Image (tube, grey):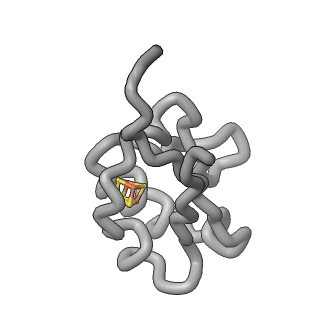
Amino acid sequence: MSDNTAIFIRVDIDETVQTDKELCKLLIESCPVDIFQSSDSGGIETVESNLDECTLCDICVEAAPGKVDVVKLYRA
Ligand code: SF4
């Protein structure tokens, strides 16, 4: 069994972000572990397989104050 040191997170993205192209681009470019990517609808979505790479750096939260939230989901 692998160790349980990983922190699992969920990233909540406010729907107003989806129509803000500049902010979407900024989020995609600024996350150091590529958790954001373009979505088919022209906005952004999270890359599920990269979520456990999140460093909790808060760059995304600071880039989109009140619009992006990194929610920590610790393994029980
Ligand atoms: S906290 Fe940092 S690593 Fe995690 S999703 Fe935001 S920008 Fe990416």
Image height of 22 relative to 25, above or below: below
Image height of 23 relative to 38, above or below: below
The residue that appears at 55% across and 71% down in the rendered structure is 68
Q: Position of residue 3 (x, y in %)?
A: 38, 27
Which residue is at the far top? 1
The residue that appears at 52% across and 29% down in the rendered structure is 49
The residue that appears at 47% across and 84% down in the rendered structure is 65
Task: Please state which of residues 49 and 42 is positioned toward the viewer in this rendering.
Answer: 49
Looking at the image, residue 59 sits to the left or right of residue 65; the answer is: left
Q: Position of residue 70 (x, y in %)?
A: 52, 65
Task: Please state which of residues 25 and 68 is positioned toward the viewer in this rendering.
Answer: 68
- Tally of numbered discs: 0
Image height of 15 relative to 25, above or below: below
Looking at the image, residue 34 sits to the left or right of residue 48; the answer is: left
Task: Please state which of residues 49 and 26 is positioned toward the viewer in this rendering.
Answer: 49
Task: Please state which of residues 3 and 73 is positioned toward the viewer in this rendering.
Answer: 3
Q: Position of residue 42 (x, y in %)?
A: 64, 49
The residue that appears at 37% across and 79% down in the rendered structure is 62
Q: Position of residue 13 (x, y in %)?
A: 63, 65
Looking at the image, residue 62 sits to the left or right of residue 64; the answer is: left
Where, by quadrant of the figure, is residue 57 drawn? bottom left
Q: Dividing the image into four equal quarters, which quarter contains ligand 1? A: bottom left
